Amino acid sequence: QVQLVESGGGSVQAGGSLRLSCAASGYTGNLNYMGWFRQAAGMEREGVAAIHRGGGTTYYADSVKGRFTISQDSSKSGLYLQMNSLKPEDTAMYYCAAAKRVLGGRVHDRTQYNFWGQGTPVTVSS
C-alpha cells in the first residue's frame, strides 16, 4: 500500500507563489507516474502536472504551463509543485496521486491513478 500526504497549501494574493509538497511512503517501487490534480468547488477533478518517476519527463495542462513546475527529489519519495503567478482560477483543493502505469499517455486522466492523498487547499484572492 502507498500513502501520500500533501502539504504547503494556503492563501495567497494573485501573482503570488506557493510550493506544494507530497510525501510518499509504503511500497513505491512499482509506481511509474506521479501527478498533481486539483478540484475546484462544483468542478471535476483535473490533472495539472505529472512526472514520470524513472525518466523525469514532465507534463503540464495548458492552463498552468509556464507557471507551475513539478519535480521530485532524488529519492523519488518527495513530489513538489512550484506554483508561480497564481490566479484566482487556480483556487482549488490540490491532490497528489500516484500511478503504477498510465495507458495511452493519459497522464492527466484521474482514472489512471491508483493512490491519492487527502488534498491541500489553495486559495488565490484577487
Image: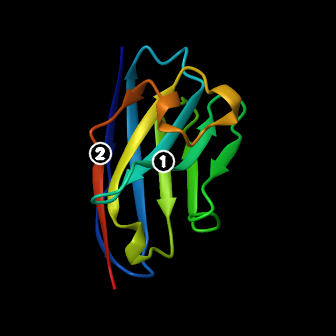
121 or 109, which lies in front? 109
| Left or right relative to 27: residue 72 | right
- Give the label, 2 or 1, closer to the camera: 2
Q: In this rendering, would 45 be left or right of 32? A: left
Q: Is residue 12 above or below residue 6?
A: below
Is residue 77 visible to the viewer in this orientation of the structure?
no
Q: In which quarter of the image is the N terminus?
A: top left
Residue at 50% across, 76% down: 85
The local secondary structure at tag 2 comes to: loop
* Mark 2 and mark 1 residues within 8 Å of each other at the beta carbon: no
Which of the numbered marks, if any, corresponds to residue 80? Answer: 1
Query: Which residue occupies the foreground of this view, 74 or 8?
Result: 8
Residue 53 disc label: none
Q: Residue at x 69, y 34 (%)?
A: 105
Instruction: Name the image quarter holding residue 19.
Output: bottom left
Residue found farthest to the bottom: 126
Residue 10 seen: yes
The percent coordinates of residue 58 (x first, y second) are 67, 45
- Identify residue type, mark 1: Tyr
